[in-house]
Amino acid sequence: MQKLKYLLLILPLLILTACPNVDPAIKAGRDAAAAGQGAILAAQAQCKANPSAKVCPVLPQAAAAQNLLVTSLETACGWNPAAPPSDPNAKCVVVQGALPALNSATANLTQILTELNGAMK
């Protein structure tokens, strides 16, 4: 079940990577989401090995910020977050009105990842 959850998180990101000439806000969001996925997986491994690790309390915030960013990316591409396209060649049609929320979600995740990475040291 855990692997399915990760697949559902990653699928929209894979679809976004197939889009040439991506809007800079979409690209920044996609890059932050990919970095977030890697950092969250590393933090989860630390918490599994040592549940009292400094990183463990930050992990729920990072996961929530990651989910918000993925939803913002889907919305900014004009996709329904409840049913993102399954076609890896789906076109991202930028919804300009959704870009401020995407920028905010990207900045939020970036800030939390800084905290997460600091706690992992």
Image (cartoon, rainbow, N blue to C red):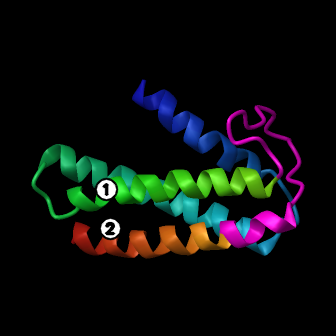
Q: Identify which residue is drawn at 59% across, 43% down.
A: 10
Asked if marks 1 and 2 touch (Cβ < 8 Å), the reply is: yes
**Relative to residue 15, is residue 61 drawn left or right?**
left
The N terminus lies in which quarter of the figure? top left
- Mark 1 crowdedness (10 Å alpha carbons): few <14, some 14-19, many ≥20: many
Farthest residue to the top: give it. 1
**Picture quarter containing residue 9?**
top right
Tell me the amino acid under the disc marked 1: Leu
Q: Is residue 17 visible?
A: no
Residue 22, given in percent of the width and then of the height, sits at 83, 65
In the displayed structure, 34 sits above or below 7; it is below
**Which residues are the magenta region?**
78-102
Q: Nearer the viewer, residue 57 or 35?
A: 57
- Mark 2 crowdedness (10 Å alpha carbons): few <14, some 14-19, many ≥20: many
Query: Where does label 1 land, which residue?
Result: 59
Q: Identify which residue is drawn at 49% across, 33% down.
A: 5
Local SS, label 1: helix
Residue 39, given in percent of the width and then of the height, sits at 40, 59
**Relative to residue 28, is residue 22 drawn left or right?**
right
Which tag, 1 or 2, sits closer to the chain's start?
Answer: 1
Q: Is residue 71 part of the magenta span, yes or no?
A: no
Tell me the amino acid under the disc marked 2: Leu
Q: Which mark is residue 116?
A: 2
**Relative to residue 118, is residue 107 drawn left or right?**
right
Local SS, label 2: helix
Task: Give the tally of numbered discs.
Answer: 2
